[in-house]
Amino acid sequence: MIREVTRMCVACRERKSKQELVRIVFNSDYTNAMIDAPKADGRGVYVCRNSECISKCIKTKALNKALKRNLPDNIYAELSRVEING
């Protein structure tokens, strides 16, 4: 039996498949953050691809809390432009 891999959204705390989420990752030496980098090494967090979760994540700076680092504002700006699944 093959189980589907799920991840938790940092905004709504729901478990969803990786395809329904956006990954934000800090590389292993914490010098660079990237959005939607599914194969990148480093500490990553996931956010749902819906406007409510993305807005909540930006408003509360949830990525900073989850990654235990201050992300540059351009990452939040880039996150606001992520394509929303309809």
Image (tube, helix red, strand yellow):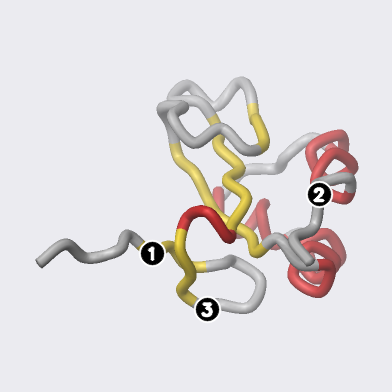
User: Does 36 sit left or right of 49 as displayed?
Assistant: left
User: Which residue is disc 2 drawn over?
Assistant: 83
Which amino acid type is shown beneath numbered disc 3? Glu
Residue 35 figure quarter: top right
Q: Nearer the viewer, residue 83 or 45?
A: 83
Q: Given contact means CB atoms under 8 Å apart, are the residues at marks 3 and 1 in contact?
A: no
Q: Nearer the viewer, residue 65 or 56?
A: 56
Which amino acid type is shown beneath numbered disc 2? Glu
Calculate the distance from the C-alpha at mark 2 to the C-alpha at mark 1: 20 Å
Place of residue 34 in the rendered image (x, y in percent of width and height, measured from the top left): 65, 30
Mark 2 vs 1, N-terminal side: 1
| Helix, strand or loop status at disc 3 | loop
Q: Nearer the viewer, residue 1 or 24?
A: 1
| Helix, strand or loop status at disc 1 | strand
- Which residue: 66% across, 71% down? 11
Mark 3 vs 1, N-terminal side: 1
Foreground disc of the pair 3, 2: 2
Say the numbered circle drawn on residue 41.
none
- Which residue: 47% across, 55% down? 18
Place of residue 83 in the rendered image (x, y in percent of width and height, measured from the top left): 81, 49
Say the numbered circle drawn on residue 6.
1
The quadrant in which the C terminus is found is bottom right
User: Which residue is disc 3 drawn over?
Assistant: 14
Which amino acid type is shown beneath numbered disc 1? Thr
